Each structure stands twice: as C-alpha cells, then as structure tokens.
Amino acid sequence: MTDRLQLHVHDLDVMVLTGIYSEETHLPQPLRISIAVDLDLPRRFDPESPLGESKNYLDLKHAATTALPPGVHFKLVEAVADHICETLILQDKRVARVEVKIIKLAIAEAGESIGITLVRHRR
C-alpha cells in the first residue's frame, strides 16, 4: 500500500456562471467548493523538509477560484468540478486523486446542502 498525503481546502465561496435554467444563465451563482487532494509521497517528512516535498495549499484554492476561466458558462456544476480536478492533476504529477465537493448555495431553502461530489484519479 502506498503512503499518501491528503491536502484539504474546505468551504470556499465562489461566484461561478453555471446552471441550465434561464434564471441561472445570466448571472454568476454562489457555489461552496471543498477540495481534497491525495499526493504521492516519495519519503518521510522530517523537521527540515522543504515545501517542495509537499504541495502548497494555495494551489488548491487557485484551482477553484482564479483558474476557473472568466466569462465561461458551465451548464453543470459537474463541469466546474471536472475543471478543478484537471487543473490540479495537470499541475503536479504527484497528484494521484482529487475530490471536489460543490454545494449550490442559491437553491437551499432551509440551510440544507444540495450538490455533488466528483472524484478523479490520475490515469
């Protein structure tokens, strides 16, 4: 069994052009995005391990925010999740698995979480 490090960024609120209904296609809507990345580990960490032995958490945040193409309308939130996964997999060969959870905040009526989770593995 291979050791892996899992990095997390939870509950990023991001405005994204997404949706299939006419009321959703003109304005960005709020999504709550959480990401978990499994990173292959080459060795153990010691007190002097440099950042390059791990991954910068801000890379995860970037994939869910500034790496989303501005002005592009994603019909499905699944496509948003897929774009985030591909960004992270292409960015670092050590990324073995990406899990993206997206909650559509605008459709909640009583504080419930309605959305999807997409998991991609490096092929």
Image: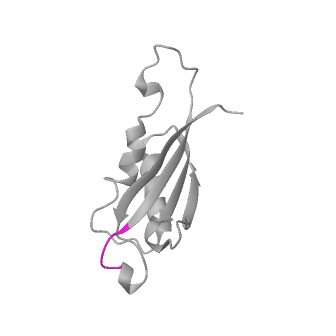
Q: Is residue 31 magenta?
A: no
Which residue sits at x=50%, y=61%? Answer: 102
Which residue sits at x=50%, y=49%? Answer: 35
Query: Depth check: 123 or 42 in front?
Result: 42
How many marks can you see?
0
Q: Provide the major secondary structure of the magenta segment.
A: loop
User: Where does the image place residue 82, in percent across and percent down from the top left?
Assistant: 48, 60
Query: Depth check: 26 or 84 in front?
Result: 26
From the viewer's perspective, is residue 118 above or below residue 74? above
User: Where does the image place residue 123, in percent across and percent down from the top left?
Assistant: 58, 50
Which residue sits at x=37%, y=83%? Answer: 23
- Colour mapping: one colour
From the viewer's perspective, is residue 6 above or below residue 62? above
Residue with the most extreme right position: 1
Q: Is residue 26 magenta?
A: yes
Query: Depth check: 41 or 111 in front?
Result: 111
Q: Quadrant of residue 27?
A: bottom left
User: Where does the image place residue 88, in percent across and percent down from the top left?
Assistant: 45, 47
Q: Quadrant of residue 91?
A: top left
Q: Which residues are magenta?
A: 25-29
Left or right of residue 27, residue 74 in this image: right
Residue with the most extreme front position: 110
From the viewer's perspective, is residue 61 above or below residue 94? below
Q: Quadrant of residue 25?
A: bottom left
Query: Depth check: 1 or 76 in front?
Result: 76
Residue with the most extreme left position: 71
Where, quadrant-wise, is the N terminus in this rendering? top right
User: Where does the image place residue 87, in percent across and percent down from the top left?
Assistant: 42, 51
Which residue sits at x=58%, y=20%? Answer: 44
